[in-house]
Image (cartoon, rainbow, N blue to C red):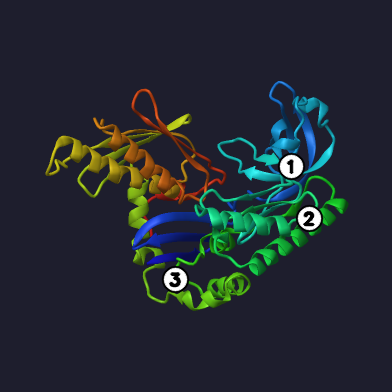
């Protein structure tokens, strides 16, 4: 049973995704902390720093956004110049240009922006000038990948680019075509707004948390969506009317006292997920340490002694830890470099099994998560891209109260 829960408290909206009662994803957004990722602005170049190959852009926020030279070049690598130009030869102070936020302002840093525009739909992403078709790497079936690539080529015109999202697997051509047409129409409206806007100006605001949640999570294997307010349920029903009308019977209104997320044990699971010491079902535990530079996770057997050999005990503990770590990376929305110190294993086959297990789990992550592999010191190295700021950590650190 896979469920999505939506709870609203004043200006705060929370979404949780559960698999058989176990929390696998959680997001929180407030009116003052809404993510800017995906927003498109007409901005003005304030400063150009050749030494950093970056420019600072005023898009109307408290801190100027920054734009790297790579995000100014053609989005298709095959169409970029052989010799990368200097940022100073590409943009100048006072110049106005359209940019899209790809990373929220975090820890005093301004937002990161790009000119590689990307509009996300239910089944595909539309890139107005990328000039290529790609298919999500999470779609394994070669025949399906080829089918989607052929459909993508038939849908795009001129230098448009299309990326078939994971949700596109099995989708009918008519649905994919409708998605492409809607996004193309949206892009033309953004271009029209840009013609008359004076920088800095917001040209397009990305969908909010509720809309993104329905768009990204309401797949064929999502059995139920629960909401604790009828107006939000009606909002979800309206969205499903355009992307999956037959799925509206899976909507549920929560009427019981005590809070929807509390009823499903989400608060307790969040507290456990954000703890420094995190227990494993087997009796082992993780120690989770985060620094500015990287996240370090230590795996320990604890009180688990197993029933067979030491190698078997260690392997079972590491296997359980590998699955849990990837789930916690999603819940905590950990970004950057991650180092895992698993318990030492003698057999190379066991080490390879842990690596493959983590690769499979990483593919469930909506964010880009790469399992690099074992280092020379026997540590597991991962990287994960964090794009959105989050208020979840602040909430967990606050005095306990119902969500």
Say whether residue 87 is left or right of residue 259.
right
Residue named by callout 3: 224
Q: Does residue 379 appear left or right of residue 173 in this picture?
A: left
Residue count near mark 3 (Cα–Cα under 10 Å), binned few <14, some 14–19, many ≥20: some
Q: Secondary structure at mark 1?
A: loop
Which residue matches tag 2?
157
Residue drawn at x 75%, y 27% as measured from the top left: 82
Assign a secondary structure to mark 3.
Answer: strand
- Nearer to the camera, 391 or 114: 114
Residue 101 pos. (x, y %): 67, 45
Q: Residue furthest left?
A: 307
- Give how far across and how far down residue 221 sits, in percent: 45, 66
The residue pinned by badge 1 equals 115
In the rendered image of this protein, does residue 175 appear above or below residue 129?
below
Left or right, residue 73 beside residue 255: right
For marks 2 and 1, give the CA distance: 19 Å
Distance, label 1 to label 3, CA atoms, is 38 Å
Look at the image and tell me whether residue 256 can be seen.
yes
- Whole-angstrom CA distance, mark 2 to mark 3, is 37 Å
Residue 352 falls in image quadrant: top left
């Amino acid at each position: 049973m896979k469920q999505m829960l939506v709870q609203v408290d004043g200006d705060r909206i929370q979404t949780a995704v559960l698999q058989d009662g176990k929390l696998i994803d959680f997001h929180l957004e407030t009116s003052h902390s809404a993510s800017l990722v995906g927003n498109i602005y007409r901005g003005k170049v304030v400063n150009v720093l050749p030494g950093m190959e970056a420019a600072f852009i005023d898009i109307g926020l408290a801190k100027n956004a920054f734009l790297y030279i790579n995000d100014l070049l053609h989005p298709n690598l095959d169409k970029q110049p052989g010799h990368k130009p200097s940022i100073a030869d590409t943009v100048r102070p006072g110049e106005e240009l359209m940019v899209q936020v790809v990373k929220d302002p975090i820890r005093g840093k301004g937002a990161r922006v790009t000119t590689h525009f990307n509009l996300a739909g239910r089944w595909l992403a539309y890139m107005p000038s990328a000039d290529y078709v790609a298919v999500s790497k999470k779609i394994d079936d070669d025949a399906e990948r080829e089918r989607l690539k052929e459909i993508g080529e038939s849908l795009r015109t001129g230098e448009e680019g299309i990326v078939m999202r994971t949700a596109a697997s099995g989708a009918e051509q008519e649905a994919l075509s409708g998605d492409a047409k809607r996004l193309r129409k949206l892009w033309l409206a953004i271009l029209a707004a840009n013609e008359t806007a004076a920088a800095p100006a917001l040209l397009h605001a990305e969908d909010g948390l509720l809309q993104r949640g329905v768009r990204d999570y309401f797949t064929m294997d999502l059995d139920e969506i629960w909401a604790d307010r009828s107006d939000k349920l009606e909002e979800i029903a309206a969205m499903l009317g355009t992307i999956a009308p037959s799925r509206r019977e899976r909507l549920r209104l929560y009427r019981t006292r005590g809070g929807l997320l509390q009823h499903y044990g989400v608060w307790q699971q969040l507290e456990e997920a954000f703890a420094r010491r995190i227990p494993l079902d087997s009796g082992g535990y993780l120690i989770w340490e985060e620094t500015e530079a990287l996240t370090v996770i230590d795996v320990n057997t604890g009180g688990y002694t197993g029933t067979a050999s030491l190698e078997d005990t260690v392997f079972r503990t590491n296997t359980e830890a590998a699955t849990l770590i990837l789930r916690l990376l999603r819940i905590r929305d950990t970004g950057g470099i991650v180092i895992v110190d698993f318990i030492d294993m003698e057999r190379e086959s066991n080490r390879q099994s842990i690596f493959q297990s983590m690769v499979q789990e990483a593919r469930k992550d909506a964010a880009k998560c790469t399992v690099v592999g074992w280092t020379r010191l026997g540590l597991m190295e991962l990287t994960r891209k964090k794009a959105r700021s989050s208020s979840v950590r602040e909430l967990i650190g606050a005095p306990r109260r119902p969500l």
